[in-house]
Image: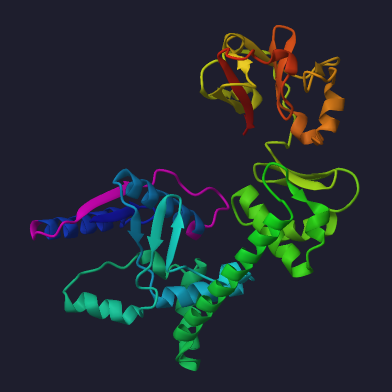
Amino acid sequence: MLALHVHHGLSANADAWLAHCEDRCRRWARAGKRVEFVAERISSRPQRGDSIEAWARQARYRALRRMALAHAADLVLLGHHRRDQAETFLLQALRGGGVAAISAMPALARRDGVSWARPWLETPREAIEAYARRHRLRWLDDDSNDDERLARNRLRRRVWPSLVAAFPDAEVTLAGAARWAQQAAALLETTAATDLATIGADEGAGLDLAAWRALPDARQRTALRRWLARILQSPAPATLVERLLAEALATGTRRWPVVGGELHSYRGRLSFVPGARRAIDAGPVAIDLSRPGLHEVPAWGGAFQVDRVARGGVPAAVAAQLVVRARRPGDRFQAGAARPPRSLKLQFQGAGLAVPARAGPIVCDADRIVYVPGLGIDARALAAAGEPQVALTWLPR
């Protein structure tokens, strides 16, 4: 069994807390209990404007995951209890959160290769404290719990006592409401997944706007939120969802900046282009792409993924001496052996590739185009059958 401890470095007492936990585990080990103490110090610090609570929570979970995986632990037990759940529900409701937000904390979740469990989520805090006293377990209180600049502390110190005085069952009732919200959120998630599968939405091809708009209004919103969360790898801001609902079907190409790139609608599809906020115009860069793996190209803000293939690739000997450069007037690309070479502009249009997705580097063998991001390998550069060859994929950052 592991005892995991995160030293956030935010309190003057943090070293003492670490020493207390380490000493307690050492005593258990001497008594024959198989407990190994593992700790990690957070070296980063919150930036100006960051929520201290949010920063600490994110840093804590990242550290817990690193420690668990480093010691081959698949399950991490967290100490949240019923009052924590009720407070979280209330805080999220006061912040205007939707169903997913007021679902508060799940009793069990699988995330990032680790199962996170909260076995005390139905247990009142008083029962846990009574157990600790009965077994003579000494605990320490976090002094930051008195800091009313933090939203949870204001709720806990100013609001909670009055709420419980007026409604004695508030903790039980609010925790129960969170369970109802979890069930509703699970149903919405299932419906959204079914809708997205039905209308053929995926990360590569994007969201078919006409098929999406044919959904009932509530399911449009839910499907859009789920698609955005999958694409952006985080919940989408409500303001972005509302803008897309109002603007995504407008004619012409439209763009919406988001973290990590931008969304754009083009030819009836909504898609995400990573790192597309500005076009990069770096000079020519010589590169060896003959070896499988990830090959970073910092000057172009991305990397090439190289994989050995049996067909449809570039000869490995050619891939060893390539140059990446910016697009030039007169560049032509041949999409297939039976097709004529055409200008890159026409090829991009034929492939339905929107302008922001056309900014990647052109890969050449001397003056001959070999590979174009979004179009693939030029038919004139394909390897012969049986020849050692590699496939190329451009990954913008």
Q: Residue 368 location, x and y as percent?
A: 74, 10
Question: Relative to the observer, which residue lies in front, 117 or 160?
Answer: 117
Question: Relative to the observer, which residue lies in front, 148 or 181?
Answer: 181
Question: Relative to the observer, which residue lies in front, 343 or 7?
Answer: 343
Question: Relative to the observer, which residue lies in front, 170 or 245?
Answer: 245
Q: Residue 128 location, x and y as percent?
A: 29, 77
Asked whether, in this view, residue 14 is left or right of residue 210, the answer is: left
Q: Which quadrant of the rendered structure holds the C terminus?
A: top right
Asked whether, in this view, residue 119 is left or right of residue 348, the answer is: left
Residue in view at x 78 percent, y 23 percent = 335
Q: What stretch is highlighted in magenta?
A: 30-53
Residue 389 in sight from this viewpoint: yes
Residue reaching furthest to the right: 251
Q: Residue 276 location, x and y as percent?
A: 72, 36
Q: Residue 7 location, x and y as percent?
A: 34, 52
Q: Which quadrant of the rendered structure holds the N terminus?
A: bottom left
* 222 shown above or below 331: below
Asked whether, in this view, residue 111 is left or right of residue 196, the answer is: left
